[in-house]
Amino acid sequence: MTGLTAIVFAGVIFYLVMFLGSRDSDDDFEALGATFYASLTIGVVCGVAGGFSIFQAIRKNGWCRRVFKCFLVFFFHLFFWVFFWVGFIFIQEEWDLNPMVGLLWLNIPIGITAYQSYRRTSREWDWCFITLLVLYADIVACLLISGAWHPDTYFLRGLLFGFVFVVLVLAVGFIHRLVKRKVSTWLFVYYLLGLITIGAVYVGTLIQWSMWQGR
């Protein structure tokens, strides 16, 4: 707790000095008349002091160590999905490749998530259910991209009811795992994928149906 207090205090002091300096100077980088290099030195010193304090807190305090580990896991998954999502945008907009290539690209992180969650849960019913949802979404996406099939209103209506059913089933499974304390980070992401997948199928099918009706 001491380390967290130190980093917060150091950050507040630094930004307060920068704010006061910017009121007396046209240059936002100057603080209390100091040059850019002096302001940079203040920032580096505050960062080193705060970083050292956090390191000491993590080394001595189990609670800080758990919080730090949670932050690391969160940012790992965040950068993991941002990387593949940016690649998907480049494939679709910048490189103008076939949409099927974009679908294959998105299946890479989905496959990695499925494998990592399987290692921690094995073939339990919720993992199998989400995997079937992902396969179903891939099949529907391939049919829509290839133009070999056009959805009708009955399919859209059934898909909407299916979405409600999937949400209820995943909610029950997730609550059950929370009670049993068997939710890993990869499995949590896989649950999110299940919800996003069925939602994306419904939205994509609705857009395709609207375009087909407008012809």
Image (cartoon, helix red, strand yellow):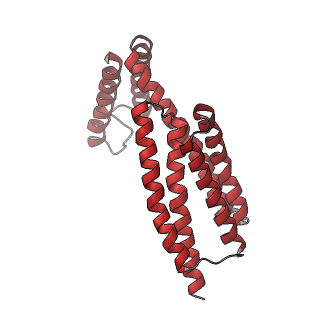
Q: Measuring 51% from the left and 35% from the top, which residue is drawn there?
A: 185
Q: Residue furthest top?
A: 60
**Quadrant hosting residue 204:** bottom right
**Quadrant hosting residue 10:** top left
Q: Measuring 52% from the left and 79% from the top, which residue is drawn there?
A: 153
Picture coordinates of residue 202 (x, y %)?
52, 67
Q: Quadrant of the C terminus?
A: bottom right
Q: Of residues 9 and 41, which is closer to you in this image?
A: 9
Residue 122 left/right relative to 37: right
Q: Quadrant of the N terminus?
A: top left
Task: Establish if 77 lies above or below 46.
Answer: below
Task: Establish if 5 lies above or below 22.
Answer: above
Q: Of residues 59 and 108, which is closer to you in this image?
A: 108
Picture coordinates of residue 79 (x, y %)?
56, 41
Q: Measuring 53% from the left and 59% from the top, which residue is drawn there?
A: 198
Task: Establish if 61 lies above or below 163.
Answer: above
